[in-house]
Amino acid sequence: MKKFNVLAAIDYIVLICVICLTLIGIAFIYSSAIDRDGVLTNSNYIKQIIWGITGIILMIFFACYDYRKMERYIPYVFYFSCLVLLYTCFFGKVVKGSRSWLGIGSFGIQPSEFCKVIFILFLAKYLNESENENPTKRFIKSTIYLLVVIGLLMLQPDLGTSLVFIPIFLFMMLVSGIEMRYIILVLGVGTFTILFTILPVWESGIVGHPVAAIKFLTDSRLRLVFTLSMLAIMIIGLLGLYFYRNNKYYYWISFFAGIILISLIASKFVGMKLKPFQLKRLIIFLNPEVDPRGAGWNIIQSKVAIGAGGFFGRGFLKGTQSHLSYLPEQGTDFIFSILCEEWGFLGGFLVFALYLCLMLRMVHIIKTTPNKYGAYITTGILGMFFFHFLENIGMVMGLMPCTGIPLLFLSYGGSSLWTSMICMGIVMAVKYRRFNFMN
């Protein structure tokens, strides 16, 4: 048995990246709280410092803890977390249109943040134990677990957080050896569900006149006919596959018809759960000038802030968009905009470099870890970090929908920061125990 060494358990590349990103986040949370007169309007940066220090303690704890011991009881934790999400749907606090917070007074936590890492651990356990199962059965069961979590989040409704689980799922499916057709199925259903949900809002809110090509989504009778047609095509394809087993054309006909059919049904559910302003936020990035004082305001001001920073930036605490309160959610969702205004392209490049280093480190750990359970866990965490980074940076640049996805380590919020720190601690534990010795 190898003697345990706390200092050896810490991956210093990961630690340096995490500390640098957290310190940058604290600095710009402080900057976001300064008004036009130079007065500090809130103490959020103090809270972030406390969450950061306690988060580092959590990270070191999980780096030292043998992650394989969690495999035994993670199913119970997962089922309990699902119950907590269900409870939150009915008794949680309403924040930004979603009932996704629990707490007393000003103290609150977002259970869905912690559910991300719990889901990763749970799915990793199942994938690790089911390698000899039928691939189709393995995929179906994994998808059911995914849909349970997404369904509970959509009841709140919290579209942004629910979207994070899809790349987590896809990344883990890729490394688990699941056939590509199943991954295409999930990607197809996810993509068409979003399209079928937002296209009617795009027609009314962006274009401003009827679009013939999407009338099958806006006219209830045509939508019903189209849905029944997809069902009929799928059934015909399945019958053809049954009678002509070697004919793959029937398989692909039923496959793609099934994707469209499921997406039509799912988009109806999503459209009913999301409020009109939430749906409009998803498509306003296509043309924010349509509603410059409403849904498009955040994106317009964010792009102004990023552009104003230039190459070197205006200097720390010298930005105007945040200090003149032009940019809402400036300490959370749009913190990267403030950073780019005050530190310019160089500041943005620094954040990019730190994230790239962090994610490449995770890729290295996945490739060098013979323990498949650990590899699955690290892959899920990589998927989570990749999506958060891509969506948040794309959102503030006006290239992606506004979904309220925070920039991990930088955005203000204890639940998000703790979850990120815990994930990095587990990644360190996977690396430290990659040769499968026990402690």
Image (spheres, helix red, strand yellow):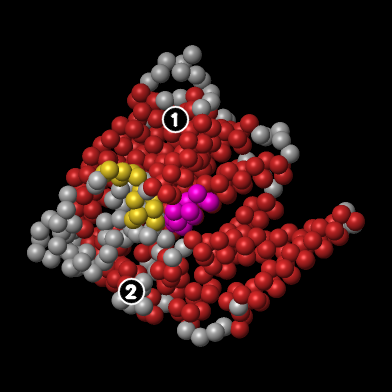
Which residue is located at x 77 percent, y 66 percent?
232
Which residue is located at x 74 percent, y 70 percent?
229
In the displayed structure, 243 sits above or below 214; it is above
In the displayed structure, 425 sits above or below 399; it is above
Mark 1 secondary-structure assignment: helix
User: Along the line of sight, which residue is nearer the eye, 344 or 392?
Assistant: 392
User: Along the line of sight, which residue is nearer the eye, 335 or 157?
Assistant: 157
Q: Is tag 2's residue or tag 1's residue first in the polypeptide sequence?
A: 2
Q: Is residue 128 magenta?
A: no
Asked which quadrant contains residue 12, the reply is: top left
Expressed as whole percent of the image width and height from the top left, the position of residue 35 reads 14, 62
Q: Which mark is residue 429?
A: 1
Residue on which the image places disc 2: 294
Q: CA distance from mark 2 to mark 1?
A: 46 Å
Mark 2 secondary-structure assignment: loop
Q: Is residue 131 left or right of residue 9?
A: right
User: Along the line of sight, which residue is nearer the eye, 142 or 246?
Assistant: 142
Write down the region rendered in magenta: 150-160
Which residue is located at x 48 percent, y 79 percent?
204
Residue 369 visible in rendering: no
